[in-house]
Image: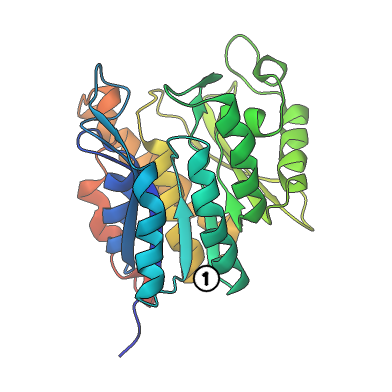
Amino acid sequence: MKRVPMIAAINDLSGFGRCSLTVALPILSAMGYQVCPMPTALLSAHTGYPNPQVRDFTADMGAFLAHWDELGLSFDAVFSGFLGNAAQVDVLEPFMREHKARGALCVVDPAMADHGRLYSGCTPELVKEMCRLVSLASVTTPNLSEACLLTDTPYKQVVNEAGIANCKRLQYLGEQLLALGCAAAVITGVHTADDTLENWVFERGHEPRIVRTLRVGKNFAGTGDVFSSMLCGELLQGESLYTATERTAEFVREVTDYTAKAGTPLQDGVMFEPFLHRLCGLANGNE
């Protein structure tokens, strides 16, 4: 019987609002992987809602990883997302470094900001420390705001007042991300003037490539989590980064369009659940 590949998914767990682990667990499980979650924080709802109850998990993360080590667990991929503070990088970096040395896929979604602003609770110190994780990544998946922060580039130098990005500056951002040490980067969800969304793919030894999809026109919470989760699964299946980005971007477009037509509140996230059957068994080579 074929072994089920294992993914260590390190992210926050929000009780309400489709994001982070509540997105990664069903998507990657549907794709045929065993997903082993480690929360970085526990929230009653994500921070897009007023007054969420938040419990920091930093003090427990080291013991959590130590027990995994005692059990002899070795993961095919390490997939990190939102970190609650800079100290969590100190806990996670040796774990990721060890698995990278074993040949594991390392996907880093540096979930820290959007629309040019840091998320609530994220600090400049976290941005600085996040660069250490990005340096270890097989692929990192920042949005435009996060790419600017990681490369110390002013957001207003990259986008105009309408939020449209400058292509030359985007190329510079990609080059600077690779200079941090990661093998590849995808800058996600870039708005254009012609009502499309672009995902810029940067890989060592390749010219930048762009994956374009139609823009739905609404910015739902958690779409970055859907993107990075499915991309991780596609890459672990053996897809090329460009093909994985194409497939993932189209999936995100479909679920976003469905969600917008359903009239779902933006903060509730995208209704990916009716589409999970399309992902079933991809890790075993089934469509």
The C terminus lies in quadrant: bottom left
Q: Is residue 50 above or below residue 59?
A: above
Q: Position of residue 6 (x, y in %)?
A: 38, 70
- Lateral position of residue 202 relative to residue 98, left or right: right
Residue at 73% over, 51% down: 181
Which quadrant would residue 46 be assigned to in this image? top left
- Lateral position of residue 222 relative to residue 273, left or right: right
Q: Is residue 10 above or below residue 264?
A: below
Q: What is the residue that sits farthest to the top in this orientation? A: 161
Of residues 272 and 98, the one nearer the viewer is 98
Of residues 283 and 183, the one nearer the viewer is 183
Q: Is residue 142 above or below residue 135?
A: above
Residue at 50% over, 24% down: 114
- Lateral position of residue 13 relative to residue 156, left or right: left
The N terminus lies in quadrant: bottom left
Which quadrant would residue 52 be assigned to in this image? top left
Q: Position of residue 62 (x, y in %)?
A: 41, 55
Whether residue 168 appears in this view of the structure is yes
Q: Position of residue 13 (x, y in %)?
A: 28, 42
Q: How is the image coloured?
A: rainbow
- Badge 1 element: loop
How many other residues sit within 10 Å of disc 1, few (<14), some (14-19) or many (≥20)?
A: few
User: Which residue corresponds to mark 1?
Assistant: 238
Residue at 47% over, 60% down: 78
